[in-house]
Amino acid sequence: MEKYVINGGKPLQGEVDISGAKNAAVAIIPAALMVDGICRIENMPQISDTDMLLTILTQLGAEVRVICPGTIEIDSRNVRFCDAPFELMRKIRASYYLIGAMLGRFGSAKTTMPGGCNFGVRPIDQHIKGMNALGADVDVRNGFVYAAARDGKLHGTRIYLDKVSVGATMNIILAATLAQGRTIIENAAREPHIVDLANFLNSMGADVRGAGTDTVKINGVDRLHGGSYSIIPDQIEAGTYMAAAAATGGEVLVKNVIPKHMDCISAKLMEMGVAVEENDDTLLVRRSEPLQKGGKTDDFFFLESDGDAAQKLVCDLVTTRLPRSYGFDPVRDIQVLCPTKLGPTGTQALNVELQNLLNPEQKGKPQLQSASRVFRVGDKVMQVRNNYEIVWNRIGGEQGVGAYNGDIGIVESINLRERSMVVRMDDRRLLYPAENLNELEIAYAITVHKSQGSEFPAVILPVAQVPPRLCYRNLFYTGVTRARRLCVVAGRRDVVNSMMSNIRQNLRYSGLCALLQAGQPSEQLSTEGESP
């Protein structure tokens, strides 16, 4: 196993060039499949994800030429639709962009579910919703995604995303670029790499407007022509070097950046006493004095606690401390994300405590018992499995069907006679009859796994008792990065250190090896699979 030995305590000095944005590149490469000509792409990051996508395009029949490091040419004119190489697609999360690209060009696609992540399956429900609206039938079974335009061609339409999703926004843009008519995406994501994808497509002859806002309009075109394009710098890479310079007390010139993309990081560093000098395409980061603490302006805290005391701390943070200090609504703004369901700081125990504190039983307040759950008006609840038939009404009159695993809402009303509930999720009201109540769980506290793809104003991450099989860095990272404004980690320092140091998340602790060894002689195990 490779390891890094870091001898700290020395300020960083010097200059660093930032490479192209990975999150833009992994969508732009599939977009090249739609181009009827040669497209030259500069500032391409040289990483495994882009290498794998380029290999996929090559196996589909595209010609890929490396002009120089960071510059490639892609010629997709001879590509004919065929199944994508599944083994490669399973290794990369961004493979789902091939669905939109191939649907747009060929009217059909067959891919695997997105891979590249050892922490659960990435949901693509909003991607599917968009493709369905454009006129494609999408079927997910046995780990594969089958998509086909109903009449061989996609048609523009209006699409409202139930969740702000970067991947779904970009995938729908890809599919809609060669569709007939106008497509409007509402509640779209606004990240810089979405703007970059739109700019790439427009440079090849597309008509995408409004990227970077919450409403994107795509006027479909008949074809895309070749051209040249340079990918934007990677803001995550740039931010990492900026933070490193601030942490070590050095002076680093970060080159090849778009300063506006770094405004949020620059502002936080300056709040801590770090000097950030902005030029056309560079940022000079310098720190000579100790970092300053900001009190209520801080956005991350670690509070040490354990056992029942940690449970009490989490409840106090939700009900009193954060609402009083930051003005958060304890139900709508604060989300507890637990690594596990069990123990004093697991979802089961915390939901009981938080429900009793935030929404206690009261005379005259209707409540429903479903299995071991008690639902009351005002409770925060979560859909725990996909239901493509449940009816909803959008405030304003639109009606539709479907609720998806991970959707969160508030119980608005309860009909005791019919044992049904109305749950409001954003601007939709969903009617849950008695037979569907088992699809809902109390959601004051949810697992980190269920939070993937979501964001919350404030997150509390209890890490007091975490089973060894869940002590890995990706889980901690996922929990912390769900917070939009504030994250509080409450628990044991040794557990945090254990999670941060464990990058072997792909190992599975099933006990299968021990069971096999106990059931078979060692000689049989050592020769199993060998030719007779």
Image (spheres, rainbow, N blue to C red):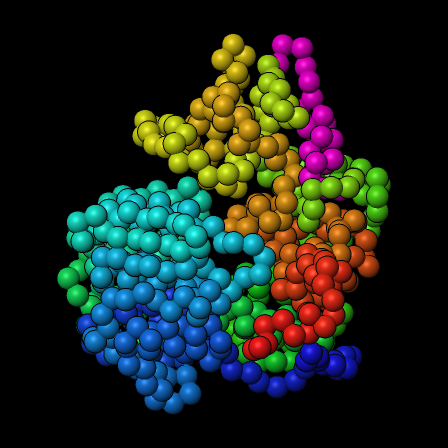
Q: Residue at x 66, y 60 (%)?
A: 508
In terms of depth relative to the viewer, which is nearer, 276 or 379? 379
Q: Residue at x 58, y 77 (%)?
A: 532
Instruction: Provide the residue span drawn in magenta.
Output: 345-365
Q: Residue at x 19, y 72 (%)?
A: 36
Q: Is residue 54 left or right of residue 247?
A: left
Q: Looking at this view, name the residue that lies furthest to the bottom.
A: 68
Q: Is residue 72 left or right of residue 445?
A: left
Question: Is 141 drawn above or below residue 431 in the view shown?
Answer: below
User: Does the stretch in magenta take in 354?
Assistant: yes
Question: Is 57 drawn above or below residue 317 in the view shown?
Answer: below
The answer to which quarter of the image holds residue 178 is bottom left
| Residue 111 percent across, percent down from the top left | 37, 60
Q: Is residue 283 left or right of residue 247?
A: left
| Residue 13 percent across, percent down from the top left | 65, 84
| Residue 343 percent across, percent down from the top left | 77, 41
| Residue 31 percent across, percent down from the top left | 31, 67
Q: Is residue 476 left or right of residue 157?
A: right
Visible in this render: residue 292? no
Question: Is 64 drawn above or below residue 488 in the view shown?
Answer: below
Q: Looking at this view, name the residue that lies furthest to the front.
A: 532
The N terminus lies in which quarter of the figure? bottom right
Q: Residue at x 20, y 68 (%)?
A: 224
Visible in this render: residue 36? yes
Numbered label tally = 0
The answer to which quarter of the image holds residue 525 is bottom right
User: Does the stretch in magenta take in 211?
Assistant: no
